[in-house]
Image (cartoon, rainbow, N blue to C red):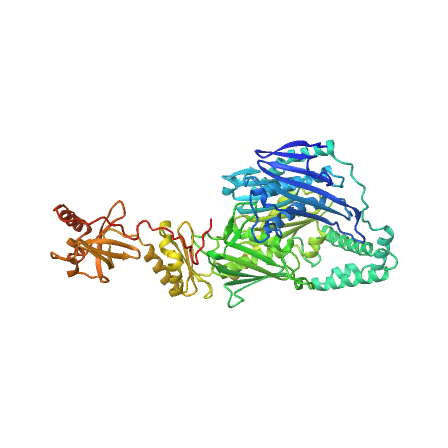
Amino acid sequence: MNMAKTFEATLGDSKIVVETGKLAGQAGGAVTVRCGDTVILATATAAQQPRADVSFFPLAVDYEERLYAAGKIPGGFFKREGRPTEEATLLCRLVDRPLRPLFPKGMVNDVQVIITALSTDQEHYLDILAIIGASAALMISDIPFNGPVGAIRVGYADGKLLFNPTTSQMQTSQMDLRIAGTADSVIMVEAGANQVPEDVLLQALQEGHRAFQDVIRMQQQMQAELGKAKREFPLFKVSPETEQAVLARVGDRAAQALAAPTKEQRNQMLNDLRTELAKLFAETYPAAEVSTAFDNHVKRLVREAILAKGHRPDGRDLKTIRPISCEVGLLPRTHGSGLFTRGETQVLTIATLGTASDEQIIDGLGTEDTKRYMHHYNFPPYSTGETSRPRSPGRREIGHGALAERALVPMIPPQEQFPYTIRLVSEVLSSNGSTSMASVCASTLALMDAGVPIKAPVAGIAMGLIKEDDRVAVLTDIQGMEDFLGDMDFKVAGTANGVTALQMDLKIKGIAPDVMRTALAQAREARLFVLDKMLSTLGSARPELSPYAPRITLLKIDPQKIGAVIGPGGKMIRKIIEETGAKIDVEDDGTVFVASVEKEGSDKAVAMIRQLTEVPEVGKIYVGKVVRITDFGAFVEILPGTDGLVHISQLADFRVGKVEDVVKLGDEIMVMVIDIDGDGKIRLSRSAVLEGLTAEQARERDQRNRSSGGSGPRPFRPRGSGDRRPEGGRGDSRSRR
């Protein structure tokens, strides 16, 4: 029986409509969320039995990107969706992050949240609806959940904040800020920005939090009216007996291990203790309890040292940044490289410059688009002293790469200024906290080393938080242990002028605005310090590209002339490529990219293209070839595919009785363009060149000769007029819409 019920909430200038009771009735909780014509289905289901002997919460968030939502049929042989796109993976991470802290501590039953895109109007974003839908499904389910969670996107244009903007409104926005949180506080932040000041970000966070309160109210109403009774799940807990036994055995050795000077030494001593405990209590207490009791003890020691004494595991105070070193130009045959080391975190980024054909084509639920700047992040197991089988990029790699990419996007020069496709690859060589922000710094160095004229250098820093009741410590430049044992991971990237990327995740229910303000202020201070270290290594982009990078020249031609460049069946463009060795890409708007490692080849290709697409000018003198002779004159090709008529009266500086007395087929002669009529017919004059006449003088003489009763020229059309793109394709060029 259909018991569908609808709830509504206001989000910005739009209405959010949530319906439940109609679809997916056997899921633990199921809702559809609609804004405009964009609709998602969100379901939440928990396993009946807990996982055996685990101490972590097995939450899985999956996003099913269905192309039918956009009225598309998938490509490929099988004509169905394949592995998740990067955009789908990032959406999963975005939904997971604000939900995870709100489940009961110690929960070990599998919980699966599945988001399915059912319809998209290309104007209203799916990601915010996905967070709201996941929270609503959990609220009405039988799964324990300390929500609800609200979410909103905030833009910034013309000095004004935009709440829940459409994709059209975001075209002019300087900021793309996504916020999620509870009724009391913000839990998750994800932002890309174009050097937005910290005070604007703080205002956006505060006002954005207020803006999604109606969504919170709606979910509370849904739970009150329709919510299932919450199941009692067994929670993983460490028994007092296990905890006492572990503490008695460890004594002061955990504190001694934490005092070791390096990560490697600390980890080795702590792992030795953990192994000892596991063997000692193997027959007495559950292994998961023993391990967790030890970890809890270490966590208490680290947090108390920071809160009580301001003493961090590596001996730093709260604001000190680990030692930094920078290096560029490490790799001789790459186009650019930058090595950034901060403490025991080290990242090498390599920059590669390519042509327009190297752009990434993005074809998902949104409109087909291309990317000319890409950032890829690799996190090999040796970076943490571990071993594992090689695998394709996971959610961590995709997420960290996207964050670093977002930090630098606003600083990439426009294509008109720098017509290159840019790929950055960040290789994490050593990891002890904040490899994503180290990737931002190494990427800036690599870009400048490659000669990319970025608008401003970008640096990044990771902030942390330790909070116990009223005691709060904000940490600058957190290392791995502080990230794992702390309450916040707050990454900020930007220039000297403002923020370009921001990402915050909380493990607690929220923080006060003044703590956020302190964190942003410390992050700015740290960012400027890091920038100074980077610029002391390389102060600006190199003036010259690597000798191994392609030299690209950007031309703009009349789109009607594209056919002349391509030639029948691609004949002409292949000829240019064969003769010059250049790589050529032609866009539908008449933009032509000419790339060659050798400058000579590039210059020759450019000259050939300009010759093919040149438009005749009145008064200009050309060396042309006689291609046809008639009784009344000669047709001369002055440009490839474009010819005009030299009337017999304009052939010489004397009276000509017969055209063949002066010129023959194949002769090359100098002529002047004296007129181009409205139909594109070109009249030429050889006598004007011989006598030194102007185009006006030659044109007057030509008109007098024609009006005196001579047999004027028969109608003609130059071969270059009305040139159309051949049906035979484009050869090596591409058409991208």
The quarter of the picture where residue 140 lies is: top right
Judged left or right of residue 407, residue 101 is right
The quarter of the picture where residue 728 lies is: bottom left
Count of labels shown?
0
- How far across and down, in percent of the image, does residue 721 sit? 30, 50
Which of 258/286 is in front? 286
Residue at the limit of the structure toward the bottom, as seen here? 332
- How far across and down, in percent of the image, does residue 680 sit? 27, 48
Which of 218/355 is in front? 355
User: Relative to residue 184, is residue 430 depicted above or below?
Assistant: below
Residue 146 visible somewhere in the drawing:
no
Which of 516/28 is in front? 28
Judged left or right of residue 26, residue 734 is left
- How far across and down, in percent of the image, does residue 390 sit? 65, 62
* Quarter of the image where the N terminus is located: top right
The quarter of the picture where residue 624 lies is: bottom left
Which of 73/506 is in front? 73
- How far across and down, in percent of the image, does residue 406 sit? 56, 51
Residue 683 visible somewhere in the drawing:
yes
